[in-house]
Image (spheres, coloured by chain):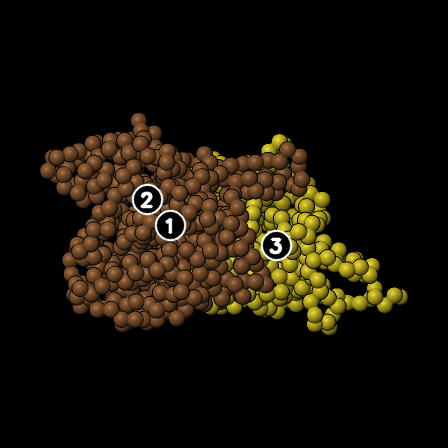
Amino acid sequence: MDKTATKEYETVIGLEVHLQLSTESKIFCSCANKFGEDPNSLTCPVCLGLPGSLPVLNKKALEYGIKAGLALNCSINPLIKFDRKNYYYPDLPKAYQISQYDMPVASNGFLMITDEDGKPKTIRILRAHLEEDAGKLIHESTCSLVDYNRTGTPLLEIVTEPDLSSPQEAYDYLQNLKLTLQYLNVSDCDMEKGSLRCDANISIREKGVIKLGTKTELKNMNSFKAVKTALEYEVSRHKKVILAGDRITQESRLWDESKQMSFSMRSKEEAHDYRYFPEPDLVPFVVSDERISEIKASIPELPFTKLERLIKEYKITEYDARIIIQDNAISDFFEECTLHYKDFKKICNWINGSLLQELNSRKTKLAQIDLGALEFTKLIQKIDDETLSNLAAKDVLTHMIDSGKSVDEIVKEKGLSQVSNDSELEKIVEEVIADNEKVANEIKEGKESAVGFLVGQAMKRTQGKANPKKVGEIIKNKLSKSQ
Amino acid sequence: MKLNYLTAHEILDLIKENKTSAQKVYKSVLDQIDNSEKAIKAYANLAERSEISIDENKPFPIPIAVKDNMCVLDQETTCSSNILKGFKPSYDATVIEKLKDSGAIIIGHANMDEFAFGSSTETSCYGPTHNPWDLDCVPGGSSGGSTAAVASNQAIWAIGSDTGGSIRQPAAFCGVVGLKPTYGRVSRYGLIAFASSLDQIGPITKDVEDSAILMNIIAGYDPKDSTSAKPEDALFLNTLSCRDDNYSHSCDLPDFTKALVNDVKGLRLGIPKEYFIDGIDAEVKQAVLDAIERLKDRGATFKEISLPHTEYAVATYYIIATSEASSNLARFDGVQYGLRKIPERPRKSSIVDMYEETRAAGFGTEAKRRIMLGTYSLSSGYYDDYYLRGLKVRTLIKQDFDKAFKEVDAIVTPTTPTTAFKIGEKTSDPISMYLSDIFTISANLSGIPAISIPCGFSRNNLPIGMQIMAKPFDEEMLFRIGYTYQQITDWHKKRVNL
């Protein structure tokens, strides 16, 4: 076999994430920072870059930048300085972007992921810097239009070192990054709305070689999944090129989601000289240690610390804990439930099962619905004390979320109380046996596994209200008695 | 004397005594414009007279000319450049807002060198402004339209901007008082930037008293300008680094008219030896030395000082100012406002074609020269040798002043090496044009306030200016010395008859 074909290659990936910060107003003016409004309705002389206008830094944007930096274990540069990045583009009204060049607000941090062997792996974060977003171009058939609403949206650009070794790791990094940032409430991290955008730098090299291979930069991925797929495509493209004896061209490539391929953007990029220099319209200033400490103190317990604590404190499985920490509100809800109800595993089951199902089917979040932890645990208790069957309890949960009413009210209103009354149940069982003679006979002949079927029929007949345990006992009794 | 020959404080006194009205003053200014604007060409654009309203109840209903680089709501503001023709701002600059609030009557935009690039007002797209004292001479620049308007009594006041001497040099050439305040003293919001770290708006008036009155109107912290000085913000001053703890002066906003004190006794004034060099016009030198004698008579003491890095000021300035300008002017690309040109036959991509065609047609020669200089200085591979080195030398120049102000209260120099030169004399020699600002540039690089005050006339009857520089935020010192000087001299009372 050809030797080159057996060579082993390793993948080197670095990610650049542009995160829109969810401040009320834009980074250098007081226009609202909102998505989806009428084109050019959220503009002023400053974000339009009109002659004579001047930027003033939004303190909240700086706070969010520092907060994110701290949560990513970065050191914070207390001297806040901005620079101009000069380039021409119609969506950039000043023909320069106010950014941070040599003094990013945060640098030298890290984020943990789990590698393919399940071991923790550190992904170093080179820097995170603040900058302003550009406008949006809309291309019509005969002309192009500019919407400046997005111009001046605060961005935090978070750049990793080339520490990611596979598309899967890149995917996991993005998941963990998003989760961390969502805990901080600094961004909604919605890739579809463009509030989180990711460019990926990728190269491959022969195993054992230290020098990095030639990289390409991938752009235009609109989901984490797309990042992963694009990287997988690019890894194999690199391999093919190299195995064919050709060289990789250093360039930016656009990911085409519909074709599932990357295309060269023409390597014009390399010719760019952004002529960075200190932004003279913003005087550098120092953020005090106290202020940084204040911001630090405002950072909530982060998801992976929480994960470990939940497992340890509540003895729940890692699987359950991982689902619970996906949403800070959910994990808080879980912990509140534990104050009222002591079977933690059961709480997990109900949260990770029915509750998440309800939320997903409604495309909503826990924070948006009216459901108290106390009521939720009461619902679980109603199953324990056999007032409600599992099935009925699910129904009650639906009504609770719809109406915001208490468990008791709904149970009463809907007459959902479980039927445990022996004579009533006996009557039902008799009907079920009469309707399912064949199955009943099988049970009589000793096929105990068929009992479940009849229990199911009884539940159906009572719209879930029958106590399934009792029904089972009665069936067994009746069918053995008559033997 | 005609009303428009008076100073604002004289006019305000007459109004108070019911001897005249703002309407009458305004009328006298308009008559003067009708009479002499054709010869002077001080204005780039005059406001529609029908749209001007005069509020006699406002405290300062004074006709004022505003340099064509300050945004006035709905009034064409062009920086005297073809590229901004037709641009009508959707907002008022902060100084314009303040002027309007005080009742000042904005009669028009004064002519200027295109984007303030020049020292003669010859690079304007509207053609040159003429010096009221000699129509064959330049008024200086870049605020030449503003100073000519005041000198020709076509405005009582004017507002200019000063990046390297653009208020003081034309003030000297036109025989009026021009102040460049401390960087950060007056808001730059709405001033179309030339070099953001050097630009400063300031008053152009007939005497020092008016200068203080006008400063009271336009100065002060502006939350819309991050580089404007906030009194309680000590941090601002530290990062500006144009001052030293040893001579710290509060940047609280004073009542500048309180500094109009007729007393310089005991003040220590410095004469920098580097400013009295060969090549300086003998008449200019003599006039300033005479002025120094007059101040000595009033009890000021003088000593020779040294500002050793002065010789690097012009070079440093042209690196820093053009670098910032190349970035500031990049927004004039034909996309949103002003001139847009599209070539008849497409060359590159349609957007690149538009950029190139628009900028080629819209900018004049000097603007293109400076954009290229600045782009070069900031380019990768050259940044360290030019822009970064420029910043370092700038710090050294600041330190010269820090050191000097430990020994003296103010520094006195000529404003310019010569009196006004002839129109066309230096247009083909940019370097000699740049050297016209040799004495004024250092104040911009170091952020300190400086004023030019008329201190004599040449044999050819051209005005001569004396420059006084003081510590950061100590404009009061300039007013005190200038006011005292004007109590014992009459240079500021000379008027051109047109």
Q: Amino acid at mark 3?
A: His
Q: SS of the residue at dot 1?
A: loop
Which chain does tag 1 point to?
Answer: B
Are dots 3 and 1 on a single chain?
Answer: no
Q: Nearer the viewer, residue B134 or B24?
A: B134
Residue A11 at x, y percent in the picture: 70, 63
Calculate the distance from the C-alpha at mark 3 to the C-alpha at mark 1. 44 Å
At 17% from the left and 41% from the top, the residue drawn is B12
Disc assigned to residue B133: 2
Q: SS of the residue at dot 3?
A: loop
Say above or below: B137 vs A342: above
The color chain B is rendered in: brown
Q: Are marks 1 and 2 in contact (CB under 8 Å)?
A: yes
Q: Are marks 3 and 1 in contact (CB under 8 Å)?
A: no
Chain displayed in yellow: A
Q: Amino acid at mark 2?
A: Trp
At 54% from the left and 62% from the top, the residue drawn is B383
Residue B69 at x, y percent in the picture: 40, 43
Residue A134 at x, y percent in the picture: 52, 47
- Residue carrying label 1: B420
Which chain does tag 3 point to?
Answer: A
Residue A286 at x, y percent in the picture: 38, 64
Q: Amino acid at mark 1?
A: Ala
- Residue carrying label 3: A272
Chain-order first, disc 1 or disc 2:
2
